[in-house]
Amino acid sequence: MAKAHTGAGAAERDEVERRRIDFLDIASHELRTPLTVLRGQAQLMQRRLRKRPEREDESAEVAKMLYQIERMANQLDVFLAAAHLAQKRFQVNPTEIDLVAAVRHVLEAPLAGATGHTIRFAAEPEQITGEFDRKRIEELIGILLSNALKFSRGGEVALLLGRKDEHTARIEVHDTGSGVPASERRRIFDAYTTGSNAENAGAGLGLYVAREIVRRHHGRIGVRARRGSSGSVFWIELPVRQPVKAAPTTAVPQATRT
């Protein structure tokens, strides 16, 4: 009888998880269209206001609106990616691109100005050509920057891009938040997991999606404490040439929260 109850409990948990994933999938699709319209109207309003210097205050308010729209768009991307990972529909299609240009494109979005932060971007060399999925790389950078801006206490967030060696690109995002405790740095990338000292933590899916994007590029991702100051450094290493082999198996999300 105990085994029967255990089996029924497992089936019920599986059904709850399936419904949660289906909800993420449907909600992400349904909200994308109105959000795109809202973004377009806000951008049009901003362009008009920029032609009127005397309306600078209104332009600043629209910039705040655009920042929140971008945050919501990034979160929808995370939800959709998490749903596709669970459904084994998540795809990465590397093509020959300039990694630096892809990262610069992310920085064109109104990510920081409305929050009082600044983003310092440095790339050395100024072009890193390799085999990457541009869409997934932009999602990856968006996740890490959004996290850094959300948890930093103001000031500067640094995004550094370079080469570890001739075969590997390295990306670092430096924030000024409260940091990730050493005991949590490995599991912070698990699904539905947030840091124990994170205020206003979200669903705990962003870093999970980031990890899966990196894994499907056959790379590595991790986090360490900033030297000499508070905050964290999230780092990524990506091979510039992709090996010809099957993508790694998706880690099954566990419905637990730290």
Image (tube, rainbow, N blue to C red):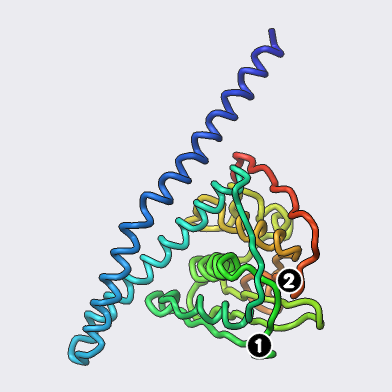
Q: Is residue 20 above or below residue 33?
A: above
The residue located at (50%, 52%) in the rendering is 80
The residue located at (62%, 55%) in the rendering is 91
Q: Where residue 68 sits: x, y (%)?
A: 37, 66
Q: Which one is in front, 56 or 163? A: 163
Q: Count residues near mark 1 (Cα–Cα under 10 Å), then give few for <14, some for 14-19, many for 20+.
A: some
- Of all residues shown, which one is farthest toward the top? 1
Q: Is residue 151 above or below residue 102?
A: above
Q: How many marks?
A: 2
Residue ID for mark 2: 238
Residue type beneath disc 2: Leu
The residue located at (54%, 34%) in the rendering is 18
Q: Where residue 249 sits: x, y (%)?
A: 73, 48
Q: Secondary structure at mark 1?
A: loop
The residue located at (59%, 42%) in the rendering is 87
Q: Where residue 96 sits: x, y (%)?
A: 66, 76
User: With 113 as the anchor, is 100 left or right in this view?
Assistant: right
Residue 127: assigned label: 1
Q: Which one is in front, 242 or 198? A: 242
Quarter of the picture containing the N terminus is: top right
Q: Which one is in front, 54 or 150? A: 54
Q: Count residues near mark 2 (Cα–Cα under 10 Å), then give few for <14, some for 14-19, many for 20+.
A: many
Q: Which one is in front, 119 or 216? A: 216
User: With 96 as the anchor, is 146 left or right in this view?
Assistant: left
Q: Is residue 125 above or below residue 91?
A: below
Q: Earlier in the sequence, mark 1 or mark 2?
A: 1
Q: Secondary structure at mark 2?
A: strand
Residue 34: assigned label: none
CA separation, marks 1 and 2?
15 Å
Q: Where residue 15 sits: x, y (%)?
A: 55, 28
Task: For the residues labelled 1 and 2, say whether their Cβ atoms are less than 8 Å apart.
Answer: no
User: With 178 as the anchor, is 112 left or right in this view?
Assistant: left
